[in-house]
């Protein structure tokens, strides 16, 4: 549905959206990048600034003084608490900083003197971000500018919410006249975005890491720098960045999984190929895990590895002739 098809003064479906107070440097750093598919809208502390926001909730960027304007937005994937280094490794410059040191400095500045950077930061992971040209920024009411520190929910049944919503539609039409926004159910509102959006690589890494409690699914290893989010079915083979297509693995197991020397069955048992022993005459540490159940799985069933994806890996990647248990 194209924006021009929507009467500016008509709202057919109530839409709830969030407007977050945005670090101006974060915005500037991201607005100049090209082809940004996701961003980490970080919060200096690990506590969420909102509750009850569904996946796909529109999330607008409200700049700080002296620019009390809406300057862009995106769509919420999920809120997560992440260590500073993991947030950088997952999102890089999509954290709104050009380097890890600049990122750390931004967090330290926001936390205040003697900030403890070992504590998790809050991360509102957003997909499909958009950034308006300065001429298209949308002014906020004086009441919002003076009274809201972190952010605020609006809905289109309210006068200010409706005004902002239509202003965002108009600005989006200017920035991308061909843009289309698909709703989860048929509605007559062009950016009613309560939908499951496409995840990016950074979101995949962050969500899989936290879904597995920051522990390797096979060994239980919890040393974060050696843990990696592995795709069961690679994106290059029509896989997705969804958590159910992921396993959190120690880096050596990730490599073995990708080349088919180990696999995980739909029953969550580890299988180790005999080719490790046959070709490299070792692998005792890996062989001992053959037939063992995964020691760690996500608590949410929807985040657990999908049986069909595991079966695909067993049939198309795994080197056959598994060892006898």
Image (cartoon, rainbow, N blue to C red):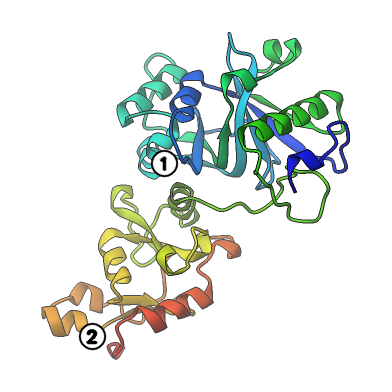
Q: Foreground: 312 or 187?
A: 187
**Image spot of residue 245 (x, y percent):** 48, 65
Front in this rendered view, residue 314 or 134: 134
Q: Which residue is mark 1?
A: 91
For the question of whether residue 269 can be seen, the reply is no
For residue 274, the mark is: 2
Q: Is residue 184 visible?
A: yes
**In the rendered view, does 154 fall on the left or right side of 287?**
right
**For the view shown, which residue lies furthest in the left direction?**
281
Residue 278 appears in which quarter of the rendering? bottom left
Q: Residue at x 49, y 28 (%)?
A: 31
200 and 7: which is toward the camera:
7
> Is residue 95 toward the left or the right of residue 11 in the image?
left
Dividing the picture into quadrants, the one containing residue 277 is bottom left
Q: Mark 2 and mark 1: span between their CA atoms? A: 37 Å
Where is 51 relative to 70, above or below? below
Q: Which numbered dot is residue 314?
A: none
């Amino acid at each position: 549905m194209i924006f021009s098809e929507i009467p500016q003064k008509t709202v057919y479906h109530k839409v709830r959206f969030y407007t977050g107070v945005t670090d101006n440097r974060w915005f500037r750093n991201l607005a100049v990048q090209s082809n940004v598919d996701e961003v980490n809208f970080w919060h200096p502390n690990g506590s969420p600034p909102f509750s009850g926001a569904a996946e796909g909730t529109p999330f607008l960027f409200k700049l700080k003084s002296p620019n009390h304007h809406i300057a862009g937005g995106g769509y919420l994937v999920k809120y997560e608490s992440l260590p500073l280094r993991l947030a950088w490794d997952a999102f890089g410059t999509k954290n709104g900083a050009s380097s890890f040191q600049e990122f750390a400095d931004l967090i330290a500045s926001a936390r205040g003197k003697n900030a403890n950077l070992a504590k998790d930061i809050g991360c509102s992971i957003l997909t499909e971000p958009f950034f308006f040209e300065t001429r298209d920024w949308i002014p906020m009411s004086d009441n919002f500018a003076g009274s809201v520190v972190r952010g605020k929910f609006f809905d289109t049944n309210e006068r200010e919410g409706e005004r902002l919503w239509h202003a965002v539609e108009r600005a989006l039409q200017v920035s991308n006249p061909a843009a289309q926004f698909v709703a989860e159910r048929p509605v007559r509102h062009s950016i009613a975005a309560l939908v499951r959006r496409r995840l990016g690589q950074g979101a995949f890494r962050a969500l899989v890491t936290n879904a597995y409690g920051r522990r390797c699914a096979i060994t239980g290893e919890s040393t974060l720098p050696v843990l990696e989010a592995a795709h069961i079915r690679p994106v290059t083979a029509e896989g997705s960045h969804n958590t159910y297509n992921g396993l959190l693995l120690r880096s050596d197991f990730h490599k073995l999984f990708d080349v088919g020397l180990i696999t995980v069955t739909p029953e969550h048992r580890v299988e180790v190929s005999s080719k490790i022993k046959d070709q490299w005459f070792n692998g005792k540490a890996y062989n001992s895990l053959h037939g063992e159940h995964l020691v760690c799985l996500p608590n949410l069933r929807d985040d657990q590895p999908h049986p069909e994806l595991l079966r695909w890996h067993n049939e198309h990647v795994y080197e056959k002739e598994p060892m006898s248990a």
